Each structure stands twice: as C-alpha cells, then as structure tokens.
Image (spheres, helix red, strand yellow):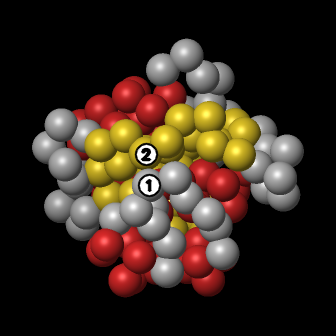
Amino acid sequence: MIVAGIGFSSTATVDSLRTAFEKASAGQNVEALATVADKEGHRALAEFATAAALPLYFVAPADLAGQRTLTCSNRSRATYGTGSVAEASALAAAGHGARLISHRQISDDRLATCAVAIGG
C-alpha cells in the first residue's frame, strides 16, 4: 500500500494540507492518508481527506517513535520522538518493511508537511 503521511500545525488549512500532499505525492498512486492520532477531529484534515477521497488512518504516538525518518524537525523529535511526523506516519501506516518513496515536503505556508511510503 502507498500511504501519504501528514504532519501539520493546528492552524493548518485545507490548502496547507493539499499543497504539501501535492508536492510529496507527484507521480505516486497514493491509496491512503495517515497522521498521528492526536490530530483526529481537525476540521481541515477531515475536509482534505474527504476531498481527496482517501481513507484516513490515525497512528498512535508510540508507533511514531520507532520509525526512522530521513529528515528531522526538532519539534517533532521533542513531541513525538521522531524526526518527522509525516514520514513516520507514512511508514507506520504502510506496514512492516515500508520505505519512503518521497521524503517530507513542506507546504508554502509552512503549516503542513507530507511524505509518502510504500509497504514492504
């Protein structure tokens, strides 16, 4: 399965999410979206997932900490124990043996990130 992982600020908009997703997923056949479970209920995320017509998976914060990422945000490291929520979410949701096929991309307004992983 090919999964787009998303990390974002609480102030992110649908446009923030869409821009990051489009940058990261160019040329990929994304089958699902994923993010950390504490983002469940975020209005822009729900609207984006509906517009993209993709299932949305929520990853437990503990499952992010074990994921090896290519990029490192100090904020993500301090909050979730991983270098990138987007990359770690994509890897965790894509399953055992997953690997990144697009590293973290940042929206133009810097409020959202997205990375894409493929399952092993």
Picture coordinates of residue 53, whole percent (x, y): 55, 33
Q: Quadrant of residue 91?
A: bottom right
| Residue at 38% across, 72% down | 76
Q: Amino acid at mark 1?
A: Thr
Q: Residue at x 38, y 28 (%)?
A: 23
**Residue at 38% in and 82% down:** 79
Q: Quadrant of the image for the N terminus?
A: top right
Residue 40, position in %: x, y? 46, 68
Q: How many marks?
A: 2
Query: How far apart are the alpha carbons under marks 1 and 2?
Result: 7 Å
Q: Is residue 13 above or below residue 30?
A: below
- Between marks 1 and 2 in the image, the one whose residue lies nearer the viewer: 1
Pointer 1 or 2: first along the chain: 1
User: In terms of depth relative to the viewer, which is nearer, 1 or 79?
Assistant: 79
Classify mark 1: helix, strand or loop: loop
Left or right of 64 on screen, residue 114? left
**10 Å neighbourhood of mark 1: few (<14), some, or many (≥20)?**
some
